[in-house]
Image (cartoon, rainbow, N blue to C red):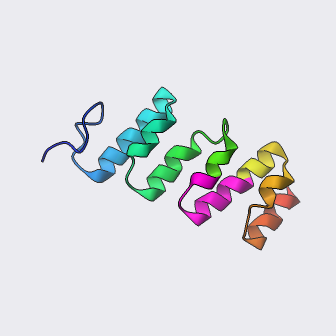
Amino acid sequence: MSPLLPGPCSGSTSVSSNDDCFKSLAAHDNNITLCNHVFSTDVRDDCLSNFVPADPTLCGQMISTSKQQTCYGQVARQLNSSAYCARIIDNASKHSVTRT
């Protein structure tokens, strides 16, 4: 099987291993653009989450609604920001953030 993409992850022989490679490389190199090479939406969201502490707006770029909501909750707690609480659509999750 030929590599999926040229470059540092060219040894990856499956979509899953390619995704894991780029996610790890993005975190290691502190290079968010490498997350764009991740195919799986869950792994891409996980890749983006590594960069949320520096850029909380990345929560809005996550595909998975549940991961996006979790991200907003974590940012709301971290920044003590009601603005991020307002972005949480699940009332139970919103309540758990405001209780802490």
Q: Residue 7 magenta-drawn? A: no
Residue 17: percent from left, percent from top: 31, 47
> From the viewer's perspective, is residue 9 above or below residue 75?
above
Residue 57: percent from left, percent from top: 67, 46
- Decide if residue 15 is on the left or right side of residue 66: left
Tell which of 31 and 95 is nearer to you: 31
Image quadrant where residue 52 sits: top right
- Decide if residue 2 is on the left or right side of residue 92: left
Q: Residue 62 magenta-drawn? A: yes
Q: How many marks?
A: 0
> From the viewer's perspective, is residue 30 above or below residue 63?
above
Residue at (87, 60) in percent of width and height: 99
Residue found farthest to the bottom: 91
Residue at (39, 40) in percent of width and height: 22
Residue interval drawn in magenta: 60-73
- Decide if residue 7 is on the left or right side of residue 25: left
Residue found farthest to the top: 29
Image quadrant where residue 65 sits: bottom right
Quarter of the rendering occupied by the C terminus: bottom right
Residue 36: percent from left, percent from top: 43, 44
Residue at (45, 52) in percent of width and height: 43
> From the viewer's perspective, is residue 14 above or below residue 88?
above
**Main secondary structure type of the part rendered in magenta:** helix
